[in-house]
Amino acid sequence: MPVVDINKDPDNLTLTITAEFAAPVERVWEIYADPRQLEKVWGPPGYPATVVEHSLATGGRVVYYMTSPEGEKYPGYWEVTSVDEPQAFSFEDGFANEDFTPNTDLPVSYCDYRFTDVDGRTRATYSSRYASAEALQQVLDMGMEEGATLAINQIDEFLAQRST
C-alpha cells in the first residue's frame, strides 16, 4: 500500500498523509494535472469523481463531484494558491453546494501537496491544515482519514495499469 504514514496533529491543526509510489515524480504529477486521470483516483473506491472544471495553475480552480454507489453527488472545489510543477501545489479544498458554490457549513482545508524523488520513486506528502481543532475533528468524524487513505492507495494500481 502506498500510504506509509498518517499524522493527525490537533495542536498544529493538520492532517498529513505520506505515501510512496513506484513511479517518477513527473508521472505522479500528471495524475493531478490531467482531469481524466484525477477522476480515477480522487474519490475513494465506490465514489468516483467527475471533474467539471480543471485549472491546476496559480489562481486556477478545480471543480468536481464524487458520486456515491446510491447515486448521491458530493461536490467540492479547489482554489489553487500556488504551483511548482512537478514538485508541489497548494490549494484551498472545500465542500460545495450543488451549484458548486462553497458550502460554508463545512470546513475548508488548506492543502499542500509535495512530491519528492527518492531513487526514481515518488514520496508524496499530503498536508491539510484547518482553521480550528473543531474543524479538523469534524472532517475526521466524517471519515476524511479513511477516505483519503483509500483514494491515495488506488494510485499505485492506476499507475501500473497506465504503464502497460
Image (cartoon, grey):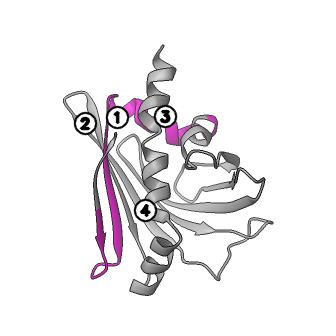
Which SS class for mark 3? helix
Q: Which residue is mark 1?
A: 25
The type of residue carrying mark 4 is: Glu
Which SS class for mark 1? helix
Residue 14: image quadrant is: bottom left
Instruction: Name the residue: 71% across, 50% down.
Output: 69
Q: Residues within 10 Å of mark 3 (few under 14, many from 20)?
A: some
Instruction: Name the residue: 61% across, 49% down.
Output: 55
Q: Residues within 10 Å of mark 2 (few under 14, many from 20)?
A: some
Q: Position of residue 48 (x, y in %)?
A: 65, 45
Q: Nearer the viewer, residue 128 or 136?
A: 136
Q: Residues within 10 Å of mark 1 (few under 14, many from 20)?
A: many
Q: CA distance from mark 3 to mark 4?
A: 24 Å
Q: Which residues are magenta?
A: 7-36
Q: Which residue is mark 4?
A: 145
Q: Position of residue 7 (x, y in %)?
A: 28, 64
Q: Earlier in the sequence, mark 4 or mark 2?
A: 2
Q: Earlier in the sequence, mark 3 or mark 4?
A: 3
Q: Residues within 10 Å of mark 4 (few under 14, many from 20)?
A: some
Q: Residue furthest left?
A: 119
Q: CA distance from mark 4 to mark 2?
A: 25 Å
Q: Nearer the viewer, residue 89 or 129?
A: 129
Q: Which residue is mark 2?
A: 117
Q: Position of residue 70 (x, y in %)?
A: 76, 54
The type of residue carrying mark 3 is: Glu
Residue 28: image quadrant is: top left
Instruction: Name the residue: 45% across, 37% down.
Output: 155
Q: Earlier in the sequence, mark 2 or mark 1?
A: 1
Image vertical order of residue 151 relative to residue 163, above or below? below
Q: Which residue is mark 3?
A: 30
Horizontal side of 138 relative to 49 (left or right) equals: left
